[in-house]
Amino acid sequence: MENNEPNQKKNEPQKIEVVLELSKESDCKQFYAIGAIGVNNIYDFRISFYNDEPELAQGAGIRKIHRKIGTEIILSPIAALELSRWLDQNVKDYERKFGPIFKNQKPEEGDQPKSKILEGYA
């Protein structure tokens, strides 16, 4: 088989243009998660995203929280690495725009975030 392309060297890979189209499945659902838990093994990473539903206090000193898993994803190690890099970059971008993210603690004086702490999330 002969190469008919004048500028392409013999045994040089042919360049192919790839167009990526993004769409959502019709049954795709959104779920607001307040946390994630997961495990990994040699084959994959499994991440479960959850939301907590506190129940009203029935007795003194005892409160029950129902942790509901809304969705679980299973990732290959490479996909998990890509997700980690994507999250790292997007958290940095977020903090550059809105200030530091504080986890369940009030920021120290002088470290006030640009965004307000929502009631019930601090």
Image (spheres, grey):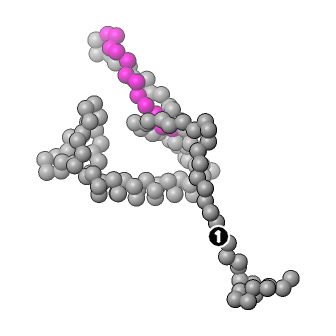
| Res 41 seen here | no
- Please tell me how crowded label 1 is: few (under 14), some (14-19), or many (20+) other residues with Cα within 10 Å: few
Viewer-nearest residue: 111 or 97: 97
Q: Above or below — where is 16 with respect to 25? A: below
Q: Which residue is mark 1?
A: 17
Quadrant for residue 90, please give it. bottom left
Instruction: Report if residue 79 lies within the magenta region.
Output: no
- How far across and down, in percent of the image, does residue 93 sit? 35, 57
Q: Residue at x 62, y 50 (%)?
A: 43
Occupied quadrant, residue 119 = top left
Which of the two residues, 118 or 6, is positioned nearer the viewer here?
Answer: 6
Question: Can you name the residue that lies furthest to the top here?
Answer: 59
Whether 120 is drawn above or below 99: the answer is above
Picture residue at 57% right of the left edge, 38% below the top: 28
What residue lies at 64% left-to-right and 66% top-to-bottom?
A: 18
Q: Quadrant of the N terminus?
A: bottom right
Q: Going by the picture, which residue comes out furthest to the right?
A: 1
- Residue lying farthest to the left in this orientation: 109
Taking 34 as reference, is 77 left or right?
right
Q: Position of residue 118 (x, y in %)?
A: 26, 36
Q: Report the number of discs.
A: 1
Q: Is residue 29 above or below residue 88?
A: above
Q: Quadrant of the C terminus?
A: top left
Q: What's under tag 1, amino acid-wise?
A: Glu
> SS class of the residue under badge 1?
loop
- Residue 98 x/y as whole percent: 27, 51
Q: Nearer the viewer, residue 59 or 24?
A: 24
Q: Which residues are magenta?
A: 48-59
**In the image, residue 110 above or below residue 120:** below
Residue 12 makes an appearance in the image: yes
* Residue at x 18%, y 48% (from the top left corner): 112
76 left or right of 106 in image: right
